[in-house]
Amino acid sequence: MGLSIPVVSGIMLVAFTIFTSLLLHTMIMEAQTLTQAISGYAAKEVDRLEVALELNIVSIDAASGVVNFTLRNTGSKTIFLQERGSIRNDVIVVYNTSGNAWSSQLVGYEVLGVKITNTDVKFDPASHPYLNPGEEALIRITVHGLEPGSIVVVTFVSHYGVTARAEGVVP
């Protein structure tokens, strides 16, 4: 009886020490993972603060459903207009119909041209598929179901998560 109590106490102390060290190690690893996630999120938020876009509807054709708009980069980050891996932009169109019902569509877009704002300097979108600060793009989308008198809201969502929106009425 004299030897078994110290042996069992020693075994319990070693088990408790191992359990405590494993728990501490797990907590440290989770804290590092959380720190990395917060740092990544903060870096993306800093990028979003440097992005600013303006959208203006140029023309709406009810017969063909074609809507042309300009997208202007007024921020300090480059906006890439072509999909590349995780870089993706979306155009969302919301419009009302004759029955006063609202419809929304996620539509593809075609870049017709890129130019420096307030100048005549133009770039071919095939060789210049991005918007640097101070540049604007003429973009075409096709929306099915437009009717004369419909209100059309076009929203461009950049790969940074920043949006630009404009509203127009179908002639």
Image: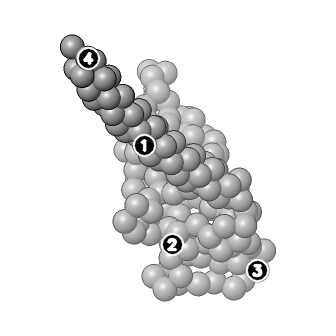
| 3D distance between C-alphas at marks 1 and 2 | 56 Å
Q: Is residue 6 left or right of residue 106?
A: left
Q: Is residue 42 left or right of residue 17?
A: right
CB atoms of marks 4 and 1 within 8 Å = no
Q: Residue at x 50, y 76 (%)?
A: 129
Q: Nearer the viewer, residue 1 or 169?
A: 1
Q: Is residue 34 left or right of residue 117?
A: left
Q: How many numbered discs sit on the rendered protein?
A: 4
Name which residue type carries label 4. Answer: Gly
The crowd level at tag 2 (other Cα within 10 Å; few <14, some 14-19, many 20+) is: some
| 3D distance between C-alphas at marks 2 and 3 | 17 Å
Q: Quadrant of residue 167?
A: top right
| 3D distance between C-alphas at marks 3 and 1 | 60 Å
Name which residue type carries label 1. Answer: His
Q: Which residue is mark 4?
A: 2
- Under circle 4, the secondary element is loop
Q: Nearer the viewer, mark 4 or mark 3?
A: 4
Q: Residue at x 39, y 34 (%)?
A: 17
Instruction: Specify which label sits upstream in the sequence, 4 or 2.
Output: 4
Q: Which residue is mark 3?
A: 119
